[in-house]
Image (cartoon, rainbow, N blue to C red):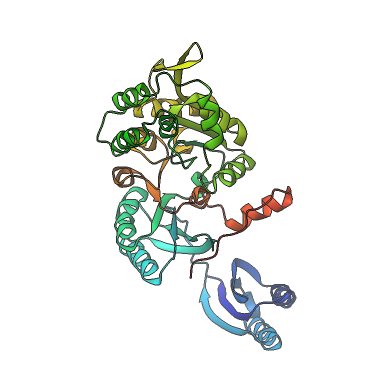
Amino acid sequence: MPLTLLVTISGEDRPGVTSTFFDAIAAVGAEVLDLEQVVVRGHLTLAMLLESGEADDRLRTVIYDVGDELDLKVKIKKGTGDSRRRRTGRAAVVVLGAPLKAGGVAAITARIASHGANIDRIRRLSRYPVTTVEFDVSGADVDRLRRELALESSVHGLDIAVAAGGLARRGRRLVVMDVDSTLIQDEVIELLASHAGREAEVAAVTAAAMRGELDFGESLRERVAVLAGLPVSVLDDVRAAVQFTPGARTLVRTLKRLGFTVAVVSGGFIEIVEELAKELGIDHAHANRLEVRDGVLTGKVVGEIVDRAAKAAALRRFAEAEGLPLSRTVAIGDGANDLDMLEAAGLGVAFNAKPVVRDQADTAVNVPYLDAVLYLLGITREEIEEADEADGTPTPAPPIPHP
């Protein structure tokens, strides 16, 4: 077996450190078998596995000399061969916390170890408005690890997503979102009902339906009935009143930059949803349609109601139209009528959702920023902001970081 040296270098980072070491190593003629570098708050850690051949002593001397010259700490461990094995059972574990406490990280890493998996790499995805880190794990059973880490999520108040790693993490995807209380902060039916003086009554029914306590179709008919007699002009008023969820524009803008397809499917109304989709450049939209006669709402919907089964069917239809398998789809929602869609998708995300939805989804995001979903896909905050800067998109002022 060939002689190898595992070299670990640490200390204050500055331009030229890595090139200085490799200029010196190149003169000796060593082969690089593995290499990794990370910088945290200006502190460098550089690790390299080198095959030294017959120049072992000279290579060690050269490396120590460069370390002394740059005032860096150098540690060298001798071995034989390249002990790397092909990694199997790869998974990406993404952890979001506001704040992310050490106790939670300790529990997660312990759970991964007890699962029999290994953490190969850790990287930070965001510092604000939430702290997000991604663990690159090997030797994992994705479904079982997801269930095991869900326990730590509830105990430590963290959002944890477990997804297959490797090529499954890359490539084009379809992202399908609910609208009310997901893409937007409002419940459109309640805004409409306010014009009829029935907002509180309708809100109570909506809440029960989203908790899964009422049949969605029946509850929708009951709520729409109170709109009978309203002039169609109220739709314009409601369109003007709705507010996008913080991070919604960033989420859609970034997904589109990546070449992803974005869709919305809603138990609300196409008269509102379609305009929102056009504003954000969303590719597909599907929702209920209100019946209008003589310029007034009749209190009925036209055609089949978009319930939980219809939402899942829409996701499948969009995926087929885009030539994508369901494994490459992501669904985001908050209510019980989203459950079938979340289950059908490759990754189902409960966004500030009702307990019944959080319990059944693949993962949950419980911070009020919709663009936090991007971190679950392995996209960093820095990448988002750099892309905004490159094309001149104004980046919203960052929120004050948590203590």
Answer with left or right where residue 255 lies relative to residue 359: right
Residue sticking out furthest to the top: 294
Q: How many marks?
A: 0
In-front residue for pair 114/359: 359
| Residue 323 appears anywhere in the view | no
Residue 264 lies, with reference to residue 39, above or below; the image says: above
Answer with left or right where residue 226 lies relative to residue 375: left
Residue at image coords 40%, 55%: 160
Residue 61 lies, with reference to residue 44, above or below; the image says: below
Q: Report x, y in % for residue 233.
A: 53, 23
Answer with left or right where residue 2 lies relative to residue 201: right
Q: Report x, y in % for residue 121.
A: 50, 63
In-front residue for pair 61/280: 280
Q: Report x, y in % for residue 274.
A: 55, 27
Residue at image coords 32%, 54%: 150
| Residue 84 appears anywhere in the view | yes
Residue sticking out furthest to the front: 197
For residue 343, what is the image quadrant?
top left
Residue at image coords 36%, 64%: 108
Q: Report x, y in % for residue 130.
A: 49, 60
In-front residue for pair 35/150: 150
Residue at image coords 61%, 42%: 253
For residue 73, what is the image quadrant?
bottom right
Residue 189 lies, with reference to residue 400, above or below; the image says: above
